[in-house]
């Protein structure tokens, strides 16, 4: 299979032909226009164990390094770039579970987040690579937030939330369609804070109380 880095380089060369700007510009107040398009923070939360392990191995990747709480003005060029990178990673990386990939259980590790340098990974690794490529393309780190959800099968899943003036958009390895957070059908649990990537916050779920009750009952009957 062609080297992923070569493929990524070709993509960025092509994306420059479409783009008339070099960096994603933060907006003043993205949340003012359509409030339902933006996920609401309701409380503090603990960081996932996978993130903690990733930061021990890759400390330079775990800071924002620029103005925090950024949101990107999503013009047509940036939307195209977002879609290109999302689709590229989804199609170039082969899905594989952590234990099958790294044998983590015998090492006493329950979840391992890393870059899929060998071309394979699970949802966590897809997200990390998408964020890395978008940052290299000029997107602010604080507008790209790792987000924990329950998928449509009520299983834990990690996606990338891109904070833009057109809403909080979700990049997902299970689909090439980028949607606003409230259109995914997922139950939102927590994400990185927009002020500090090592602080995590609990989100409104995006579900009705009745739906949450059904999900809780299903999880109790079939613990993960």
Image (tube, helix red, strand yellow):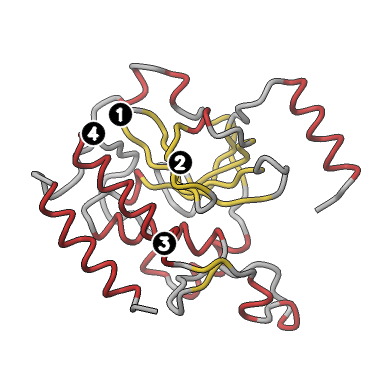
- What residue is shown with label 3? 62
Residue ID at (25%, 34%): 74
- What residue is shown with label 4? 73
Which label sits in the foreground, 3 or 2?
Answer: 2
Residue 91's place in the image compared with 158, above or below, is below
Spatial distance from mark 4 to mark 2, Cα to Cα? 16 Å
Q: Say which label, 3 or 2, has the lower sequence index.
A: 3
Image check: 201 left or right of 208? Answer: left
> Residue 15 bears which disc, if any?
none
Which label sits in the foreground, 2 or 1?
Answer: 2
- What residue is shown with label 1? 165
Q: How dense is the environment of label 3, judged by Cα within 10 Å: few (below 14), some, or many (20 and up)?
A: some
Q: Are marks 4 and 3 in contact (CB under 8 Å)?
A: no
Q: Are marks 4 and 1 in contact (CB under 8 Å)?
A: yes
Mark 4 secondary-structure assignment: loop
Q: Which residue occupies the extreme front position in the image?
A: 1
Q: Say which label, 2 or 1, has the lower sequence index.
A: 1
Spatial distance from mark 4 to mark 3, Cα to Cα? 24 Å
Image check: 71 left or right of 148? Answer: left
Position in image of residue 115 (x %, y %): 45, 70
Residue ID at (13%, 54%): 16
């Amino acid at each position: 299979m062609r080297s992923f880095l070569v493929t990524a380089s070709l993509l960025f060369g092509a994306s420059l032909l479409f783009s008339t700007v070099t960096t994603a510009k933060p907006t003043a107040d993205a949340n003012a226009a359509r409030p339902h398009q933006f996920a609401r923070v309701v409380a503090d939360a603990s960081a996932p164990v996978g993130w903690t392990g990733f930061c021990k191995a890759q400390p330079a990747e775990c800071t924002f390094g620029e103005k925090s709480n950024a949101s990107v003005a999503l013009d047509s060029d940036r939307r195209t770039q977002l879609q290109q990178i999302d689709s590229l990673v989804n199609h170039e990386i082969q899905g594989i579970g952590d234990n099958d990939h790294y044998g983590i259980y015998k090492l006493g590790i329950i979840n391992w987040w890393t870059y899929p340098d060998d071309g394979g990974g699970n949802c966590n690794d897809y997200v990390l690579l998408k964020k890395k490529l978008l940052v290299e393309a000029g997107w602010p780190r604080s507008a790209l937030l790792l987000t924990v959800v329950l998928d449509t099968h009520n299983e834990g899943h990690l996606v990338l939330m891109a904070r833009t003036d057109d809403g909080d958009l979700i990049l997902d390895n299970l689909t090439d369609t980028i949607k606003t957070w409230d259109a995914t059908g997922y139950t939102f649990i927590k994400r990185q804070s927009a002020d500090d990537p090592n602080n995590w916050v609990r989100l409104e779920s995006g579900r009705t109380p009745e739906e949450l009750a059904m999900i809780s009952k299903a999880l109790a009957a079939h613990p993960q």
